[in-house]
């Protein structure tokens, strides 16, 4: 392994037990299916699940009108068309919080949450209180007020 340069290196991606698009790598370093194939990595698409032709379930508008039978049904994501289920623990949580059953599949909800985060880039800006230079993920054209760490901590505590 020392002769071939493998010694001390991490395992090669060809030994990864998960496909690229199923891993966190796709969230942080998004690649197309073609690019993944070009790099010799695995891609997984569950065609059988995507082509679900079972009954279309009407998702109730309110959690108060949702009964336990929803957990035995296959729901369809209104965004991607991908089938998904609600588990009893999830239904219990939605009832406790008084929020309706989601209309989007867990993967789509995850993608939408990721899209809300700041980009993985730093800008140099000035603290709104003391004008010190700070590195921030908030772009200069954004409306948020940026403080340096010292001013932030002084205003919070
Ligand atoms: Zn400051």
Image: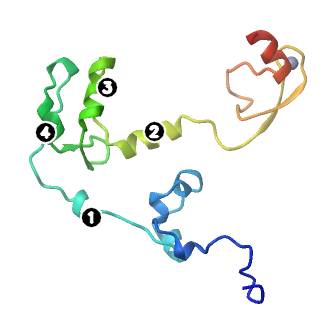
Q: Is residue 12 above or below residue 112?
A: below
> Image quadrant for the C terminus?
top right
Name the residue rendered at 66%, 70% in the picture.
10
In x, y percent, where is residue 22? 44, 58
State left or right for residue 144 relative to residue 71: right
Q: Position of residue 34 (x, y in %)?
A: 48, 70
Residue situated furthest left in the rendering? 55
Q: Is residue 67 left or right of residue 85?
A: left
* Residue 124: percent from left, percent from top: 83, 34
Q: Earlier in the sequence, mark 2 or mark 4?
A: 4
Label 3 Cα crowd, 10 Å radius (few <14 / some 14-19 / many 20+): few
Disc marking residue 93: 3
Between the C-alphas of marks 1 and 4, the distance is: 20 Å
Residue that mark 4 sits on: 57
Mark pair 1, 3: CA separation: 30 Å
Residue 36 x %, y %: 51, 69
At x 68%, y 26%, the residue is 142
Q: CA distance from mark 3 to mark 2?
A: 20 Å
Label 2: which residue? 112
Mark toward the viewer: 3 or 2: 3
């Amino acid at each position: 392994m020392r002769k071939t340069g493998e010694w001390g290196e991490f395992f090669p991606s060809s030994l990864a037990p998960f496909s690229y698009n199923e891993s966190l790598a796709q969230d942080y370093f998004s690649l197309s299916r073609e690019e993944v194939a070009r790099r010799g990595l695995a891609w997984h698409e569950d065609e059988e699940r995507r082509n679900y032709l079972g009954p279309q379930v009407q998702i109730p508008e309110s959690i108060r009108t949702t009964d336990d039978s929803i957990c035995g049904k296959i729901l369809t994501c209104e965004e991607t068309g991908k089938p998904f289920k609600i588990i009893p623990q999830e239904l219990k949580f939605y009832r406790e919080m008084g929020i309706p059953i989601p209309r989007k599949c867990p993967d789509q909800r995850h993608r939408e949450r990721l899209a809300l985060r700041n980009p993985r880039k730093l800008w140099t800006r000035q603290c709104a209180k003391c004008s010190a230079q700070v590195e921030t993920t908030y772009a200069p054209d954004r409306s948020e007020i940026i403080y340096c760490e010292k001013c932030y901590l002084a205003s919070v505590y």
